[in-house]
Each structure stands twice: as C-alpha cells, then as structure tokens.
Image (spheres, rainbow, N blue to C red):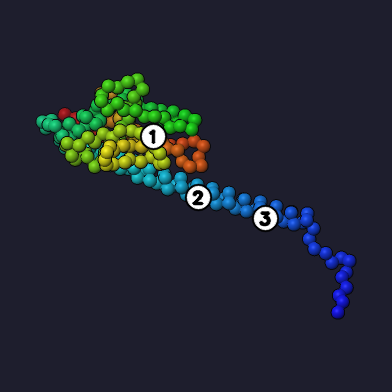
C-alpha cells in the first residue's frame, strides 16, 4: 500500500534543533549556578555558626577567669592562683587600644595578629591572644594559645603538640584609672570558599576588676 506524502509534512530544521539545545543549555547552566550559590550560602552559614561557638567559648573562658580573679581578690598571690593567672594572661597582654575593625582585612588577606609569647614585644606585635579553655583550671598548664592564620574557618585547636588559635584572637584594652574594667575585643577572620574577601566577625566583652 502506497502512502502519499504531502508537501508540507517535514521535520525540524537544524536551526530549530540548535535553538532548542541552546535554550536547554542556558537553563541547565542557570540551574547549576543557582545550586552553587545555594551551597555557598549554606557553607558560609555553617562556618559562621561554628565560629560564633568558638567566640562564645572564649567569652565564657574570660568570664570564668574574671569571676575566679574577683573571688580571689585580696588573698595572697601564689603561683597558679586565679590572680596569678589573671596577671599572666590578661594584665601582661593589655594594650592601650585595639586594632581598628576596619583594618582587619586588607584586600584578600586577614590581618596577622601577633603575640610574642616570650614577652619581648616588637612593633609588629598586637598582644593578641586566645585562651585554652582546657587549661584554665590547671596551674601547671599554659592557657595562652599561639596564633596562626585560619586554614578553613576560624577555630581553636586544643591538644598536642601545641594548642593554637587559627584566625581567632583577643585584645584586652584597659580602661582609664577612674573606671577599672577591660574591654576584650574578640575577632575572627578567615577565607571562605567562593568569597572574594575574607569573612570577619567580632564582639566586645566588658569585664570589671574588683576595687579595694
């Protein structure tokens, strides 16, 4: 049986096929881009949440040390006592003013916060520090952490061979003589995937000294 074909019965032209493929490719690329942005936002949200936990841990450690120092005020200063720890960790690292928040990020780099643990402070040192919360109640332990740049997100690494604070630091600013308090500037700076500039967050904690 013969079937006659009408003259207007035809398939898609190469131009129409290419046009359809182009539209599909554009939609696919757009969908992948949106998914990638969503993953980036989720990653940064997770990093910020983890960093805030580290900042809260440092805040709690400062308050614990301050409360122990207040309770020990007026007693004889012995090695490893709360007053001795306060003097070694806080008073020794006091600065007149903290590093400006606006200068914590330069281009694509976080500002390097230094603390010469030997006590020989140079012009480049900011007397920044972090506390090892696992050693605050151990008189024989050194609760002052070394500082290093953050490899992923800002965090504190506890344990051997040396505990370090990566991308998180504290500066203790002493008030004038009329108001005996410290302002602790806690900063966290790190390079986040997909971000042109580092992420910077911080807070200030004010703690008071006892008065005689």
Say which element carries label 2. Answer: helix
Residue pointed to by mark 3 = 24
When asked about the image quadrant of residue 181, the answer is top left
Q: Position of residue 144 (x, y in %)?
A: 26, 34
Q: Please tell me which residue is depicted at 38% across the width and 43% down the height of the picture.
A: 51
Return the disc, 1 or 3, that comes first in the chain's sequence: 3
Q: Position of residue 54 (x, y in %)?
A: 34, 42
Q: Is residue 64 left or right of residue 37?
A: left
Outermost residue, bottom side: 1
| Label disc, if present, on residue 8 of the rendered structure | none
Q: CA distance from mark 1 to mark 3?
A: 44 Å
Residue pointed to by mark 1 = 149
Instruction: Please tell me which residue lies in front, 114 or 151.
Output: 151
Q: Is residue 163 visible?
A: yes
Q: Looking at the image, do the residues carrying marks 2 and 3 touch, with CB atoms under 8 Å apart?
A: no
Residue pointed to by mark 2 = 39
């Amino acid at each position: 049986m013969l079937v006659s074909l009408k003259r207007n019965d035809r398939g898609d032209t190469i131009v129409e096929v290419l046009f359809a493929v182009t539209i599909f490719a554009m939609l696919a690329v757009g969908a992948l881009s949106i998914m990638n942005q969503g993953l980036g936002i989720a990653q940064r949200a997770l990093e910020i949440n983890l960093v805030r936990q580290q900042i809260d841990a440092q805040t709690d450690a400062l308050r614990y040390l301050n409360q122990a120092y207040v309770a020990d005020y007026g007693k004889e200063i012995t090695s490893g006592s709360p007053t001795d720890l306060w003097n070694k960790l806080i008073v020794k690292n006091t600065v007149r003013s903290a590093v400006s928040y606006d200068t914590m990020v330069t281009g694509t780099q976080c500002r390097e916060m230094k603390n010469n643990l030997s006590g020989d402070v140079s012009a480049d040192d900011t007397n920044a520090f972090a506390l090892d919360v696992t050693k605050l109640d151990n008189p024989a332990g050194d609760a002052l952490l070394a500082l290093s740049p953050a490899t992923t997100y800002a965090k504190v690494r506890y344990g051997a061979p040396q505990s370090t604070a990566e991308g998180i630091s504290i500066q203790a600013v002493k008030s004038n003589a009329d108001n005996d308090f410290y302002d602790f500037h806690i900063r966290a700076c790190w390079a986040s995937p997909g971000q042109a500039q580092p992420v910077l967050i911080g807070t200030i904690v004010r703690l008071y000294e006892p008065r005689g």
